[in-house]
Structures are given as structure tokens and as C-alpha cells.
Amino acid sequence: MFLFISALTFISVIFVILFYIYTSQNKNIIVIPNVYLDSQFYEIEKHTRVHRDILYNLPNDPFMPGRKNFKIPKIEALNLHGYTHDPNMYVDYGVYYTGSEGMDWFKDAMKAKGNTYDAFLIILDDSNSKFQYKNAFGLIKTLNIDKNTLVLIKPGTIEYRFTPVQTGNKEILNFVLNKIMKF
């Protein structure tokens, strides 16, 4: 009987540990499809269209072959209820185009202070590229994310990537969102 209770206790402890790992992982990545109202998303698209010709004529990003990107001014429309775009951080406008290697596995070295998220907003996606991340158990999860989808990642917590692009283009805005603290 003692052996049975010990085994049951051990299994319960393992379950609690795995449950904790799983639930804490889920707080580190949030995916929100159709995050902005059509009118808000139109304003964001309009802001990026101003820079699109410049973007496509730039040389490739020296740190990430197969990607073109540049920093654009703050976009007020990126603010969400309860969150605000960090005014001290840039907005990175990038494109992964046909033949691009995508973005290799990446884990942001910046440690989040408070409720800060690294945000990826899909502006245009007519590509076959997917978003992938590694869960707490090291398993790769694959998501097909469409335009107007926001992916929030707690910095320094998980590895993620965009797979290679064989057809089409994927345009992404990358920025930092901070949770507004209410007192």
C-alpha cells in the first residue's frame, strides 16, 4: 500500500510540474486573428503602403538573408485596448519574398520587464510560409497566420521562426507592445 501511495504521489507531482510548464508556456505566446477592426487595419496598411516601394527596392537584410526590412515611425493605430506601442522602440517593416529563407529559429535575448510583448502583425500574406514555435516540451507547433493576425511573444521565453517562402510574399510589422498599468 505504501508503494502504491508513493507512486501515486510521484505521478501527481510530475503532473503538476508538467501542467505548470504547459500553462506558463501558453502565457508566453498569444495569437489573435482579426485583431484590428477593418478601419484600423486599413490605417495601418495605408501607413505601410507609403513605405512599400522603398522596402522592395532595398538590399537584403545583412543579418537575415532573404529578408528586406527597415524601421518606420511609430504608427498610432497599432495601439490596442489595454496595450500601447512602446514609443522608445521602432517599428520594423519587413518582407519575406519568393525564394526567401524565411526567419531562422530565434529567441529574443531581451528579457521582458513587466507586461511587454514582442509583436508581429501580418500586413500581407499570399505566401506558403508558416509561423512555427517550440513549446515547453521542445515540440514544434506550426501556425498558418493570415493578414491582420497579431502574434504576441513574451521576450526571452520561446524560440520561433517563419518558414522559407517558396511562393508569394509575407509582409510583417514587428514592434513592442506594453500593457498599460491601471492604478
Image: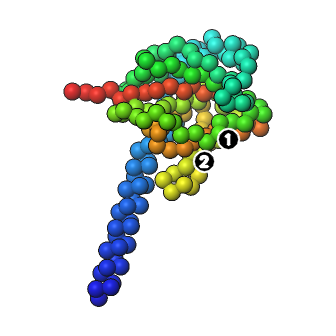
Residue 77, position as x, y percentages in the image? 47, 18
Q: Which residue is mark 2?
A: 142
Residue visible at 52% across and 13% down in the picture:
73
Q: Tag 2: Cα neighbours inside 10 Å, few (<14), some, or many (≥20)? A: some
For the image, the number of numbered tags is 2
Quarter of the image with the N terminus in it: bottom left
Is residue 169 visible in the rendered structure shown here? no
Residue 71, position as x, y percentages in the image: 58, 17
Query: What residue is drawn where x is 40% and y is 32%?
Result: 116
Can residue 85 be seen at all in this image of the molecule?
A: yes
In the figure, 70 relative to 154: above or below? above
Q: Return the residue at label 1.
A: 163
Quadrant holding the C terminus: top left
Q: Secondary structure at mark 2?
A: strand
Q: Residue furthest top?
A: 50
User: Is disc 2 in contact with disc 1, using a CB cutoff of under 8 Å?
Assistant: yes
Q: Is residue 60 above or below residue 168?
A: above
Q: CA distance from mark 2 to mark 1?
A: 9 Å
Foreground mark, 2 or 1? 1
Dot label at residue 180: none
Q: Is residue 130 left or right of residue 157?
A: right
Instruction: Name the side, left or right, on which 115 lies relative to 75.
Output: left
Indicate the position of residue 126 as horizontal and vertical percent values.
Answer: 70, 32
Q: Quadrant of residue 28?
A: top left
Dot 2 amino acid type: Thr
Residue drawn where x is 69% and y is 13% of the image: 54
Q: At numbered mark 1, what does the secondary structure look like: helix, strand or loop?
A: loop
Residue lying furthest bottom in this view? Answer: 1
Q: Is residue 90 left or right of residue 94?
A: left
Q: Position of residue 178 (x, y in %)?
A: 39, 27
